[in-house]
Image: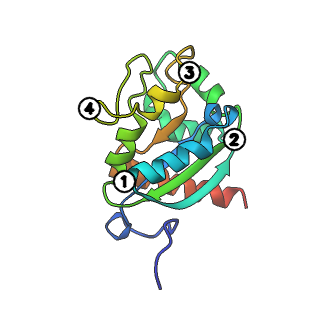
Amino acid sequence: MGFSVLDPYKVPEQMPEGTVVIMKPDALERNLHWALLRRVEERCGLKLASLAMVQLHQADVYFLYGHQSHQGFWDDMVEYLTSAPVIVAIFEGAGAIEKVRTEVGHYDKSVPNHVCSGGPLTIRSAHGDKAKPNHVNLIHASSGLIDYDKDRRWLIRKLRETR
């Protein structure tokens, strides 16, 4: 019997390489979520393994972004991320984390960055609303294997809560 990507007992060594991507409220409000999901799938050559729409609560934001809780924008970020549902996706494939992080780009929208030298702009550079603060950005992507495992386990718990 095979494992599901959402099997909480699956150890990282058994998991296919993957990454968690969260389309934040701004992406949904601006109706960019499907285009951005398609862009990640096609440009990064990854398989969409799981997709869910969830409502984040303060505890979720703390779990995902608690390392930023000392920042001056923390309360605004919690308010933003809990203001509307988000779409959470798991993409699988070789080099998923690095490919998606490159495609997403840096969170600082004032720095134009490209997927590759002279190539297309990253998602945040091409679609980010530069009039809004940096914590109001379209997309989250796991930053490494440990983050992917943490984000994936969070999603499992979140989906069980909503049943």
Nearer the N terminus, badge 3 or badge 2? 2
Identify which amino acid the numbered label 3 is placed on: Asp
Q: Which circle marks residue 129 in the picture?
A: 3
- Describe the element under mark 3 as helix, strand or loop: loop
Seen from the viewer's position, the closer of residues 106 and 85 is: 106
| Residue 94 image point, x, y percent | 32, 60
The local crowd at label 1, few if under 14, some if 14 to 19, many if 20 or more residues have their Cα within 10 Å, is many
Which residue is labeled 2 in the image? Answer: 85
**On screen, residue 104 above or below 131:** below
Identify which amino acid the numbered label 2 is placed on: Pro
For the residues bearing labels 3 and 2, Cβ distance under 8 angstroms: no
Q: Residue furthest front?
A: 118
- Taking the spot 43% from the left edge, 27% from the top edge, the residue there is 107
Nearer the N terminus, badge 2 or badge 4? 2
Which residue is labeled 4 in the image? Answer: 117
Q: CA distance from mark 4 to mark 3?
A: 23 Å
The quadrant in which residue 103 appears is top left
- Taking the spot 63% from the left edge, 54% from the top edge, the residue there is 52
- Taking the spot 65% from the left edge, 61% from the top edge, the residue there is 160
Q: CA distance from mark 2 to mark 1?
A: 24 Å
| Residue 148 image point, x, y percent | 41, 52
- Describe the element under mark 1 as helix, strand or loop: helix
Q: CA distance from mark 1 to mark 4?
A: 20 Å
Nearer the N terminus, badge 2 or badge 1? 2
- Taking the spot 68% from the left edge, 56% from the top edge, the residue there is 161
Q: CA distance from mark 1 to mark 3?
A: 26 Å
Colour style of the rendered protein structure: rainbow
Please identify the quadrant where the C terminus is shown: bottom right
Q: CA distance from mark 3 to mark 2?
A: 19 Å
Identify which amino acid the numbered label 1 is placed on: Ala
The local crowd at label 2, few if under 14, some if 14 to 19, many if 20 or more residues have their Cα within 10 Å, is some
Which residue is labeled 1 in the image? Answer: 96
